[in-house]
Image (cartoon, grey):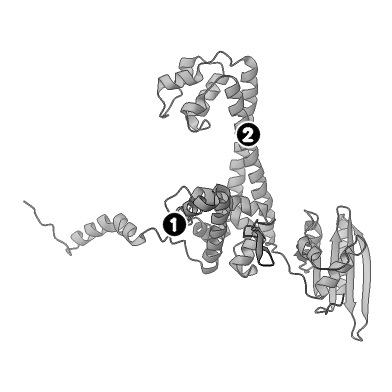
Amino acid sequence: MDLTPMHKRVIALDVHQAKITACAIVEHEDGRVEVSKRDFGAFKRDRRALAQWSLEIRPEVVVMESTGVYWKSPYAALESVGIIAWVVNARHVKAVPGRKTDMADAQWLATLARSGLLRASFIPPVDLRELRLVARQRQKLVGMCSAEKNRLHKVLVDAGLRLNVVISDVHGPSARAMIKALIAGQTLHEVLDQKGRLRASREELFEAVSTERFSARHQFVADQIMQHIEYIEQRVAQMDQYLLESLKAYEPQLRLLQTLPGIDLQGAAMLLVEIGADMGVFGSAERLASWVGICPGNNESAGKRKTGAIRKGNAWVRRLLCEFAQAAARTRCALRDKFDALKIRKGHNKSVIALAHKMLRTIYAMLTNGTPYQDRSVDYEALSVARNAPRWIKMLRKHGFMTITATA
């Protein structure tokens, strides 16, 4: 396969868990093309040797596939010596016709890079790249906490307790206090004293917590789960605080993102560490949506559209966007109208994806232009007048521009 070269000096890295295979293609002034290969280990000294060898080659482009998390250490080693490597999508490499064997991986990758057939994926700056660890660990902990809450609910149901029938959130302050009182073996009257501001009556709560099956084993398991839930919640709170303190330099962008319905402060912080604040690296909202993997698929042949399923992308951003979309669908805004219109034709799940796609494009425009979200279904002028009219009238009267007229 003849490919027209666009770069004269390229290096490609085939990164594995314990080995890095490097292939350099160098075109000399006399037109001679030299191909050299070297194998490096995965330890610190090996990565330093790789970086020094790359400096000697003086490459125009260095490329590597995004193989799990293995690419991160070589990338950082090259970055420390001033070489910014291209991390390319493995799907793009396989989509190009040509040989692809284990021995030729690095050479084939170098050939494609030399011909300008590869495009670098988005890699955020070092500070945001490291904060991704915090944000993603937080998402994992939140998932673990949800699983433990579901498990506690099953234990209570198994014991014959039906708090979920009369209480909408069994993990609210009052409901949790009642569950702790049951675990501690307190009497039903002492349990009901924890009612707080629950809407359910004392009689309804009495029926919900009356059971003879809440044995000592139920108490033991429920106590262990409750302690684990509270432990995870403490860890999540610490991560929230750490993440927000680390993003103080991005406060304007955080405030901007919160103007979009469905996004709170923590959600804005977790989204920012994933996509960054500079939308110029993506070039367009379409490319950003494609990178996330939330845009409709394009699979059409002979005039027939086969499927519009989304492809793989950044699962962490997609999960956040779906959460934002479901939250926005419960607010009074144009996004809710969009969701309701789509839900009739496409169903709930597809409507969530479609609304998340729309929100991502809106986020791109907001961060690019630095403008807050303006909802077309909200009369912002009327809201401003309603909020400020009493103060305006008071000041006009104070300075004599309005007089108070007596009415009969």
Give the foreground label among 1 and 2: 1
Residue at screen point 86% across, 55% down: 16
Front in this rendered view, residue 94 or 61: 94
Residue at screen point 50% across, 16% down: 210
Mark closer to the chain start, 1 or 2: 2
Report whether 138 appears left or right of 196. right
Report whether 294 appears left or right of 9. left
Report whether 340 appears left or right of 393. right
Dot 1 surroundings within 10 Å: few (below 14), some, or many (20 or more)? some
Any part of residue 233 in sight: yes
Rendered image quadrant of residue 44: bottom right
The residue lying furthest to the bottom in this view is: 30
Task: Name the secondary structure under disc 1.
Answer: helix
130 is higher (above) or lower (below) than 225: below
Q: Which residue is mark 2?
A: 231
Which part of the image, by quadrant, shows the N terminus?
bottom right
Rendered image quadrant of residue 101: bottom right
Residue 13 position within the rendered picture, expressed as x and y whole percent measured from the top left: 85, 64
Residue 408 position within the rendered picture, expressed as x and y whole percent measured from the top left: 6, 51
User: Disc 1 marks which amino acid?
Assistant: Ala
Q: Which residue is mark 1?
A: 334
Any part of residue 244 in sight: no
